Image (cartoon, rainbow, N blue to C red):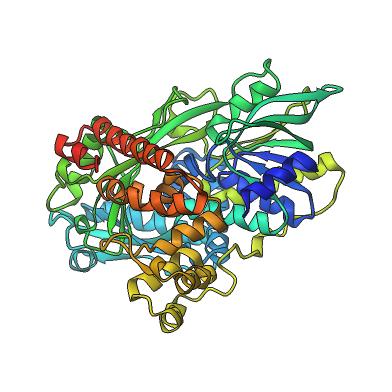
Amino acid sequence: MNRNDNRKRLQQELFDVCIIGAGASGAGAALDAALRGYRVALIDRGDISGETSSRSTKLIHGGVRYLEQAIKKLDLAQLKQVRHGLAERRTVIRNAPHLAHPLALLTPVFSWFEGMYMSIGLNLYAFFAGHDSFPKGRWLNKADALTKMPTLTNQMHSAVLYYDGQFNDARYALALAHSADEAGAAVVNYLAVTGFEQENGQITTAHVQDQLTGETSSIRAKVFLNCTGPYADEIRLLANPTLDRRIRPSKGVHMVLPREILRSDCAMLIPKTADGRVVFAIPFGDKVFVGTTDDDYTDLNQEPVLEPAEIDYLLDTLRPYLAKTPDKNQVQAGFGGIRPLILSSRTDTKTLLRDHEVEHDSESGLLSLLGGKWTTYRVMAQDAIDRVAERLGSSAKSTTERHYLVGGATYRFEDWQLLQQRFGLPTDVCQHLMQTYGDRAEQVARLTVERPVLREKLTEHRPFISAEVVYQIRQEMAVTLRDVLARRWRLELSDWILTAQITPQVAQLMADELGWDDEYCREQIRAYQTLLRSFVAQAGLAAERKAATRV
């Protein structure tokens, strides 16, 4: 993906559809539209998946909680959502096998009846999944459960094992955008919509401002599709100020603990909390992500962050399920996202539907994709582009169900050994490259031959090498430190202190590649480390940890 070339295209071409928002649904819609042969523009005011789509629980699932609600309340809408999620789970993993895989989850129970109840529910969950390739779940006795997760409490009766999918959300959205780009879409990040022009009451042009340079320009398209998730009302009202708001934002946060908290490759589902939520503890790399919360959120101008009360809530939720409750000082990072729940008469965000809707505003012509969740991004995108096709008078159909994403077509994890033979890189580096870039890993490794200095690890604690930063700039449209450290890599999400420590090295690599002068480079380092310190402070963590992010 070449940002400068795509910027020129945006100014010169007339597009069939301009998609605003490059998260899961927007990037998915861009790929769907490009594969149908449409001329596509995809823009985002920030980075690709810079908001909610990079801050999920990292699960691809139908929704165990939704199934329980569907049965208890005879709610067919909830049941439909579960079926959609389970149907898409297989597709998400198939199309990017380097970024998604099945994950075992344990649910500890404290009585025979509770175990039977959970087993019946999860067997029903597997039934709705149909004949897919996921392993079958089972009810484990106490000894077997402790073998799989030794840190569980001895107070439990047994545990129920089932399977869902896990994925790298930010890189999956990036792969969608990258695949759309290779299919012909003009993809540009850091391009914000500031206004629209209309002819005969219908939008024909979007005015945009480059968030990196301040330059303004215009994009012409036959159809405009709003895929900005929790920020959808902002675009809707920009197109037509008379519209009612449709989105009720909900904040969800995760805290990050050492992997030793579980000492397991399995995740844990906590099905009952004090306020009716579901909480997961999920291994991700060498960490465990614990979340999520579910609360109303009103200030969309502020990034949602982990706060002390949320840490206390998540630790209290873990306490009955672990032999030893983690200490607050073990929290190493955290992150928050905003769910784009569709407004209804319900007052509790935990009961609002995560299902989606494609809205057409007849007064402006704007299409808006509202609601939804990561697992069903492809169906959401397909529905949205079907509506675009209607507007264009086209009969082209979606082909995304069996379309491999960038990195996935010929991916085999065991090819890390060939990578090691050809380039002599360490085992952990080769395995990391395969699981991050799929069958494009060799392109990254090849840079180490052209410039041997790029073989160097940025830290002994992670398998990241300098060549990746160069590749991410040239091929993945990374233009800021946070693009690399929070999304192309997931380091910011998992370890604030280590992120601050390697920021200067990453900044120098970016400066060399992007032509930053010394003053600009220093300012980028200062700004990012200040942001990291603010995260530590807002989480109420120790002062010495705040100081450690100032390096």
Question: Can residue 169 be seen?
Answer: no
Q: For residue 357, what is the image quadrant? A: top right
Question: From the viewer's perspective, is 484 left or right of 256?
Answer: right
Q: Position of residue 211 (x, y in %)?
A: 56, 34
Q: Which residue lies most toward the top here?
A: 242
Q: Quadrant of the N terminus?
A: bottom right
Point 68% across, 15% down: residue: 242
Question: From the viewer's perspective, is 184 left or right of 86?
Answer: right
Q: Position of residue 256 (x, y in %)?
A: 28, 47
- Of 533 and 129, the residue lying toward us: 533
Q: Quadrant of the C terminus?
A: top left
- Of 519 and 66, the residue lying toward us: 519
Q: Position of residue 124 (x, y in %)?
A: 46, 57
Point 48% across, 36% down: residue: 339
Q: Position of residue 113 (x, y in %)?
A: 27, 53
Q: For residue 195, what is the image quadrant? A: top right
Question: From the viewer's perspective, is 162 left or right of 141?
Answer: right
Point 54% across, 69% down: residue: 440
- Of 463 and 445, the residue lying toward us: 445
Picture layout, residue 428 above or below residue 490: below
Picture layout, residue 393 above or below residue 468: above
Question: Can residue 436 be seen?
Answer: yes
Q: How many marks?
A: 0
Picture layout, residue 351 above or below residue 441: above
- Of 505 and 46, the residue lying toward us: 505
